[in-house]
Every structure is written in structure tokens, then in C-alpha cells.
Amino acid sequence: MSDAGLHDADEALLERLLEGDHRALARAISRIEDRAPGYRGLVSALYGHTGNATVVGITGSPGAGKSTLVDKLAEHYRERGETVGVVAIDPSSPFSGGAVLGDRIRMASTVGDMDVFVRSMSARGRLGGLSSATADAVVAMDAFGKDRILVETVGAGQNEIDVVRTADTVVVLVPPGAGDTVQTLKAGILEIADCFVVNKADREGADRTVQELQEMLQVGAHGPGGDGGTSGFTAHDAGHHGVRGVAGHDSDPDGDDHLEEGWSPPVLETVATRGTGLSALLESLEDHRTYLERSGELAARRRARHGADIEALLRDDLGALVARELETVGGVDALAEAVADGRSDPYRLVDALVEPLERCLADEDVRDRAEGDLEALLE
């Protein structure tokens, strides 16, 4: 449920964050991740200062080299004078629930650079590896004024669809010789990838992996079920793939041909430890950003993302209301026992729990007040 306004301490924290205090940013993200009292008012106040950052999601299987690539991208952006925020989603500790790999030992190139802010966050067991606080942490970094925000997922073999809710552009890393991994990608990652990267391309099997990915994209574009848009957030539709080379460059020098055709994910090769192939990847990221802006897809993605956030918050809040109602009748175990011994059934019990909420929503005075409040927010 919403917190009542912004507390004095959080107002001061917000002011320091907006003034560029990295300690305030770190503290704000800690409050967000801990879901501390008042965090919702803080995030709500941050939203009015967002919308300028470019957000890139980096996902893929363990060992693909995600952290090294993120480190090299951050180093490059800093060389261009841009500020960088990194949200690194790590596996959760089974004891504390915190991030296991919080030292981020593979992100060494930018250590000591205050304009590269790296934050490790715990996956908290969420399918897809993203904690529910990740999107809010990105909001905080955007409001702070970071030019580029890189979100690295845990990559523990789950379907990482959640990253789409946070990123404008999604990069999927695939290690060489990952035949089984490429097969698994067909089940879900195809729909979210804006760019495929075969990292560690100096190893045996890299060429074959590139070929398998290109074949997968061709099948997705022309074969059964190759719709490519099931996630609801994709900039490209697999049925609209244009013709792009392995480096992902358009044949049209003005970059407008693909606006009608849709975005076709390039398949790139990199050796992140040496920086090999990084220029082509950076150019592809810029190409995709240009496509998103010119096609109107950037605004569409962000609207879809905000819609998903609203629905998620509604589910969480309504779930919390029902949970409190459950406690008043002895909890779900007491209801389950009533079903087990034949006194009732799940449908009648749920109807009884929901009925007070339905009565409240049906009350004209309550609805008029709620609609008035909503209209005032929409003005």
C-alpha cells in the first residue's frame, strides 16, 4: 500500500540525490531494495526526474562473460565523457537473502571512478533473476542523472523475460559451442533479444554458434510460431526481420529502411577481455537506439513497461489486502482444513473473502471519491 507522503528524512535524501550525491543514491537504492517504510513515496518523487537515461540489459547463461563485457562497456562510455550506472543482479544468499557476488571482482577497469556507480542486488529467488526492486533502482539512477544504465542479470538458466521490463535494449550473450543453450533460447530469449553476442569468440566453436543463432533467427522469421512478439515489449517482430549483416549494419546509409521492416537482431562476436568486437557492439547499440526513437518504439516500450509496473503494483497491493483478510479468519491453513474435512470448498471461501472488497468498490460514494482522485492525478 502507498506510504502517506514523503517523510522529512526522505525529502532530504531526495534533495541530496538530485544534487549528485552518490552516497544519497546508494542509500536510496538500499531503502528501495529493503522495501523500507517510506520507499514508495521516495520512488514516486523520483519519477518526475526520469526519462533521460539509456537502459541496456545484459543477459545470458553463466560463464558467458557478462560482467567483463559490462565492465568494458562502462569503460568505453566513460572515455566518451558519459556517466554510467550498473545494476548487477546476483544470486541470492540462502542465509541472508543478499547478493552473493557483491564484490563484482570482474568489474575492475572503472574501480575508483565515481562516475561509474555499480550496485549489486539480490535476485531473491525470482524467476528470471531480477528482483522486484530492480526497476526502482533504475529509476533512482535515471533521476540521479546517469547517462547510461547497464542491467546485468544473474543468468542462472531461467527464462530472463523480466529484463525486458527494465531495459530499452536487450543484449543476450551466448558462449561458444553452446548448442544446447541455443536450443533453449528458442523457448523464450528470441522474443526479447535486440542483439545477440557470441562472447569469447576466440574459442573453438564460436563460428558454429554464430551460424546456429543466425539459423534460429531465420526459422523464427519464417517458420511456424515465428511471431517473435509474445513478450509484448519487443521492438522487433520476427516476421518483419530486415536483412542485416553479422555486424548489424543497415544497407541504407540514412538508417531509415529498417523502420518499415522492423528491427532484426544482429549476431556479433566479441572477446570482452581484450575489447575485440566492442566497437561493432557499441555501434549496434546506437543503431538500435536510433531505430527505437525514429520508429516510436521507444515510447511504446516505455508505456508498456509503465503499464506492467502498474499491474504488478495492483497485484501486490490487492494481494496484501487479501492476506490481511486471511489472517482475520485464522490464515490459509484454517481455510484449507475446512476444505479437507468437507465443511466448505475453495470457491465459496474465496467468494466470501472477496465479497467485502466487491461491496466496497460497488459503493457509489467510494467509487466517486476514487475516480475523482484518479482524475486529479491524470490532469
Image: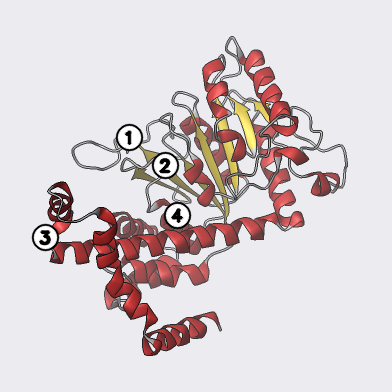
Q: Is residue 253 above or below residue 310?
A: above
- What is the spatial separation of the Cα atoms under label 1 and label 2, in whole angstroms? 9 Å
The answer to which of 312 and 306 lies nearer the viewer is 312
Snapshot quadrant of residue 278? top right
For badge 1, the amino acid type reads Leu
* Secondary structure category for the residue under label 2: strand
Q: Are marks 1 and 2 in contact (CB under 8 Å)?
A: yes
Tag 1 secondary structure: loop
Q: Nearer the viewer, mark 1 or mark 3?
A: 3
Q: Residue 130: x, y in percent?
A: 41, 44
Q: Give the residue pinned by disc 3.
A: 330
Q: What amino acid does circle 2 point to?
A: Ala
Disc number placed over residue 135 in the picture, else none: 4
Quick one: label 1, few (<14), some, or many (20+) residues within 10 Å? some
Indicate the quadrant containing the N terminus: top left, top right, bottom left or bottom right: bottom left
Q: Which residue is mark 1?
A: 101
Amino acid under label 4? Ala
Q: Are marks 1 and 4 in contact (CB under 8 Å)?
A: no
Of badges 3 and 4, nearer the viewer stands 3
Q: Residue at x 33, y 36 (%)?
A: 91
Q: Amino acid at mark 3?
A: Gly
Q: Earlier in the sequence, mark 1 or mark 4?
A: 1
Classify mark 4: residues with Cα within 10 Å, few (<14), some (14-19) or many (20+).
many
